[in-house]
Image: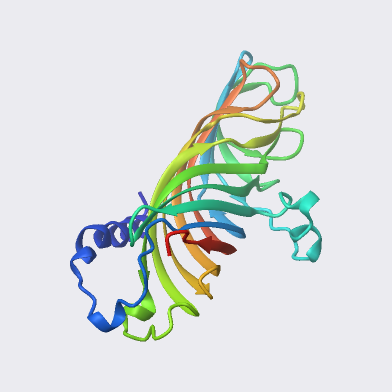
């Protein structure tokens, strides 16, 4: 596990056990409890991925590509498609709904629509066998190969869909510094959370000039930790920024229309999210 992820996990987990003991002074407790409040937000993300090994298996091949580079696919900002209802899944998007189980903790269900695109024409190491009547037929032992369109196109572009449940701690930053004189107008919350879920990518794969595969498939699991900031305006509307680190393992990626063909990979990811949403507490 990478050092940044370990550090982030420490600072996420520690407040859940230690910070509950902090008692705020009486003059900062004018705000009513968050318990029962729910929220819904929509937003966009930018993502980064570590290099990964990708293992391909089938009736006529069994080989591994080492340290494959990939990046996200950011859609240039414009009112269309970012605010076009018919095209809202074209950009990299986030949607999440949450409910406060007590004053500090909320549990939420969300969908992170990231895009993962293997960098074309990169040179990587290959190990294994290919028994197909084309120029790539043969046995490979730590050989160099260029990932061009004849050999492999590999993307999760509609997308790398991470569907998860998160537990998040919320602390009113203005309240902590005794600055929250009118909480009904503005609140600033720090966010610390962690979660886990499954991957349902729609992969776009073209392997060894075979038949292209482009369908949704349950491919694996992931877990993540995040830190962020909420700005809540007039109790009902909010802006949110998040930084998320996580790990994804996909042992079952469909690489062709044939069920016998499979690919697998795992990697770490980082994600920056910018969101806006609506919140309401029916008990206050």
On the image, which quarter does residue 156 sit in?
top right
Residue 26: image location, x then y, percent = 24, 80
Residue 187: image location, x then y, percent = 45, 76
On the image, which quarter does residue 252 sit in?
top right
Q: Which residue appears farthest toward the top when viewing the image?
A: 59
Quarter of the image that includes the C terminus: bottom left
176 to 145, vertically: above or below: below
- Position of 29 with respect to 223 (left or right) is left
Q: Is residue 273 visible?
A: no
Q: Which residue appears farthest toward the front when viewing the image?
A: 283
Color scheme of the displayed model: rainbow
- Position of 135 with respect to 52 (left or right) is right
Q: Is residue 11 visible?
A: yes
Q: 99 or 3: which is nearer to us?
A: 99
Callout count:
0
The residue at the point 51 percent across, 35 percent down is 265
Q: 7 or 141: which is nearer to us?
A: 7
203 to 71, vertically: above or below: above
Residue 248: image location, x then y, percent = 47, 42
Residue 243: image location, x then y, percent = 48, 62
The residue at the point 40 percent across, 64 percent down is 191
- Position of 91 with respect to 26 (left or right) is right
Q: 109 or 77: which is nearer to us?
A: 109
The residue at the point 57 percent across, 62 percent down is 278
């Amino acid at each position: 596990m990478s050092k940044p992820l370990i550090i982030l996990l420490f600072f996420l987990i520690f407040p859940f056990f230690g910070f509950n003991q902090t008692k705020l002074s009486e003059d900062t407790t004018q705000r009513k409890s968050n318990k029962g409040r729910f929220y819904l937000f929509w937003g966009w993300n930018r993502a980064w991925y570590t290099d990964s090994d990708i293992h391909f298996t089938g009736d006529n091949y069994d080989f591994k590509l080492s340290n494959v580079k990939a990046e996200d696919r950011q859609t240039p900002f414009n009112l269309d498609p970012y605010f076009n209802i018919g095209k809202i899944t074209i950009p990299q998007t986030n949607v999440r709904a949450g409910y406060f189980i007590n004053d500090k903790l909320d549990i939420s269900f969300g969908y992170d629509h990231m895009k993962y695109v293997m960098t074309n024409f990169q040179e990587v190491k290959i190990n294994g066998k290919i028994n197909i009547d084309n120029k790539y037929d043969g046995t490979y032992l730590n050989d160099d190969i260029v990932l061009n369109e004849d050999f492999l196109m590999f993307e999760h572009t509609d997308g790398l869909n991470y569907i998860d449940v998160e537990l998040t701690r919320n602390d009113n930053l203005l309240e902590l510094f005794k600055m929250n004189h009118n909480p009904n107008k503005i609140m600033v919350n720090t966010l610390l959370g962690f979660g886990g879920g499954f991957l349902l990518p729609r992969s776009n794969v073209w392997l060894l000039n075979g038949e292209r595969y482009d369908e949704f498939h349950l491919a694996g699991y992931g877990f993540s930790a995040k830190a962020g900031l909420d700005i809540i305006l007039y109790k009902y509307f909010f802006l949110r920024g998040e930084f998320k680190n996580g790990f994804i393992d996909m042992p079952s990626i469909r690489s062709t229309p044939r069920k016998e063909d499979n690919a697998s990979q795992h990697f770490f990811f980082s994600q920056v999210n910018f969101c806006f949403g609506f919140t309401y507490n029916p008990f206050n």
